[in-house]
Image (spheres, rainbow, N blue to C red):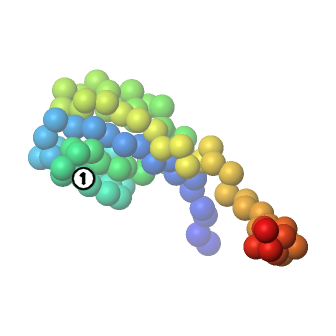
Amino acid sequence: MYKKVERQAMYVWVYSMKWKKKLQHFGTVRYVSPKMKYIMLYVNSNRVAEVKKELVSKNYVKRVTMAHRKELDEHYVLKDNAERKDKLEE
């Protein structure tokens, strides 16, 4: 059966876009921005530290930043209808 693997998004800023093929060896390339010269890469959570360390050591990488999506609270609460009616009446 399929087992869900936790993944972390990384933004890899490069000097030239010709290196995007090389980055496929580190994880799954999800998005490429040729204008801003960064590549969004998904990596398994248990390998994040070692992949980041290896990418920073490459001469074609400017910097590596982590996505903050895991830190965000994804549980939203809708306002009560009564509160919305009070605001509309004012």
In the shown orientation, is residue 28 left or right of residue 72?
A: left
Task: Name the residue nearer the viewer: 18 or 90.
Answer: 90
Image quarter of the N terminus? bottom right
Which residue sits furthest front? 90
20 displayed left or right of 30: left
Report the number of numbered marks: 1
Image position of 71 with respect to 80: above or below = above
Q: Is residue 48 visible?
A: yes
The location of residue 27, given as percent across then percent down, is 37, 50
Frontmost residue, 35 versus 39: 35
Tell me where residue 51 sits by quadrant: top left
| Residue at 35 percent of width and 50 percent of height | 40
In which quarter of the view is residue 87 placed? bottom right
Mark 1 element type: strand
Q: Residue at x 22, y 37 (%)?
A: 14
From where the camera sits, is residue 25 visible?
A: no
| Disc 1 crowd, CA 10 A, few/some/many (<14, 14-19, 20+) | few
The relative height of residue 8 versus residue 78 in the rendered view (above or below) is above
At x 44%, y 31%, the residue is 50
Extreme residue toward the right, this view: 82
Against 68, is 90 above or below?
Answer: below
Left-right relation of 17 to 81: left
Q: Amino acid at mark 1?
A: Ser
Q: What residue lies at 50% left-to-right and 47% top-to-bottom?
A: 8
Query: Where the C terminus falls, by quadrant?
Result: bottom right
Residue 59 point in image, percent of width and height: 19, 26
**Location of residue 20 in the rendering, given as x and y in whole percent from the top left corner:** 20, 48
Instruction: Find disc 1 in the rendering and name its residue.
Output: 33
